[in-house]
Image (tube, rainbow, N blue to C red):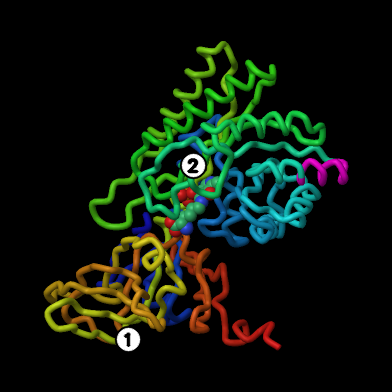
Amino acid sequence: WPRTSGRVDGALTIGDVDVRELVREHGTPLYVLDEHDVRSRMRDYATAFAGSEVHYAGKAFLCKEVVRWLRDEGLGLDVASGGELAVALSVGFPPERITLHGNNKSVAELTRALEAGIGHIVVDSYEEIARLGFLADRHGKRPKVMVRVTTGVEAHTHEFIATAHDDQKFGLSLSSGAAAEAVRRILALPSLELVGLHSHIGSQIVDTAGFEVAARRLATLLVQIKAEHDVLLPELDLGGGYGIAYIEGDEAPDIKQIADSLREIVAKVCTDAGLPVPRLTVEPGRTIVGPGGITLYEVGTVKDVEGLRTYVSVDGGMSDNLRTALYGADYTAVLASRESSAEPMLSRVVGKHCESGDIVVRDCFLPADLAPGDLIAVAATGAYCRSMAHNYNYLPKPAVVAVADGEARVIVRGETEDDLLRGQL
Ligand code: LLP
């Protein structure tokens, strides 16, 4: 639950705002983001990684207001598309603190990045090296690039979000020599400035050993590049992927410990080789915005399926939270509009979409007196829920409201029926 959440008068509060008031004003479903929670996590990172760079991974949740918070708190930003870049530039985020990622960036996206003068472009294929080299030359630019290295680490997470084993689409393999070949190709192009190596092993990872193995392999490659080319790369980007707690009993790694161990590993490999320690960057997304966000729903029906469980239907579903359907993700749900002393009943919170996989929370206990009109809050939905929302069955995407110190502010307007019909001929 968000750092400022509590209960007043039986009802859940966040940022000293009663969720019943939020719903009266903005309706349901509603994403609520605790501004103090998110900003304090940004600061926690800046402190833990002092001397390194922290680039928030915008894919977790990006909007103009979050970009302003990042700017205030002195973080950098990762973008994975021209659209994410446009959000950042629209509020004047300093381009030199932006990194562009992606395994298939378009010519238009690369050109825009060059024109804006963004800080780094992480290259992901031989074709992209040639394409970017050509474009940079044509535009008279010399962008700083990094090579995305596939380090061969098997991250313990869902298959769809593990990215460092060889058999997936991202990066250039360390073991096959593709990463070393990419380095050779970049160094041969005068229009590209190779400044470092990048690794992202996956997401929602709680066992920190994989991050350490990847950091060691990346630092070792840096040493090899110095030996082979006499080029000293000044930077290593170690990606993001640190997990958060979704249900009671979930472990979440300690950020300070991760920071200390990553720094120590890289420093040791480099100093043992007689090289200076490169500047480190990390790219957390989920750990910054995930815990501070909740989703509020109104209960519509409560259906007891004999002897099995109770199906609680809410007014959103897989269109505002795809993670349960896509990854089998776990969430925590509670009755938010009042307190109840009724017996707990095994419940499944489901949405209103036309498929049985439309599940928001697979298993949770909700009070047996739950009734239509009650509000349900689902915890830790700040990351990868609004950003992965869609319009299946023509459901409009819900608004995002930021709360702090008893005040609520819409930071992303909810979609209307007009929005849904716009663009149709
Ligand atoms: N850096 C790169 C290059 C990435 O690809 C990602 C996430 C991150 C950083 C941030 O990872 P985080 O700290 O947020 O775990 N939709 C999935 C997660 C996909 C993550 C993709 N890349 C989910 O809902 O779990």
Mark earlier in primary sequence (1, 2): 2
Quickly name the residue at label 1.
Answer: 300
Q: Is residue 332 above or below residue 27?
A: above
Dominant secondary structure, magenta: helix
- Residue type of the residue flagged with mark 2: Asp
Position of 165 with respect to 5 (left or right) is: right
Of labels 1 and 2, the one closer to you: 2
The quadrant of the picture occupied by the N terminus is bottom left
Quarter holding residue 221: top right
Asked if the beta carbon under badge 2 is closer than 8 A to the nearest atom of ligand 1, the reply is no
Between 210 and 128, the residue placed more toward the observer is: 128
Q: Looking at the image, is 270 positioned above or below residue 159?
A: above
Instruction: Tell me the distance, in whole angstroms, between the alpha carbons under discs 1 and 2.
Output: 46 Å
Residue in the picture at 57% in, 74% down: 413
User: Is residue 40 visible in this depiction of the protein?
Assistant: no
Q: Is residue 133 magenta?
A: yes
Residue indicated by mark 2: 166
Residue at 63% in and 16% down: 227
Image quadrant in which you'd find residue 281: top right
Q: Using the image, tell me which numbered label, if any, was put on residue 354.
A: none
Relative side of 185 to 84, left or right: right
Q: Position of residue 249 (x, y in %)?
A: 23, 51
Q: Report whether 148 appears left or right of 40.
A: right
Q: Is residue 146 above or below residue 366?
A: above
Horizontal and vertical percent for residue 422? Answer: 66, 84
In terms of secondary structure, where does tag 2 sit?
loop
Is residue 11 visible to the viewer in this orientation of the structure? Answer: yes
| Quarter of the rendering occupied by the C terminus | bottom right
Find the magenta span and give its range. 131-140
Residue 59 horizontal side relative to residue 88, left or right: left
Residue at horizontal 27 percent and vertical 80 percent from the top:
312
Three-letter amino acid code at the position of disc 1 = Gly
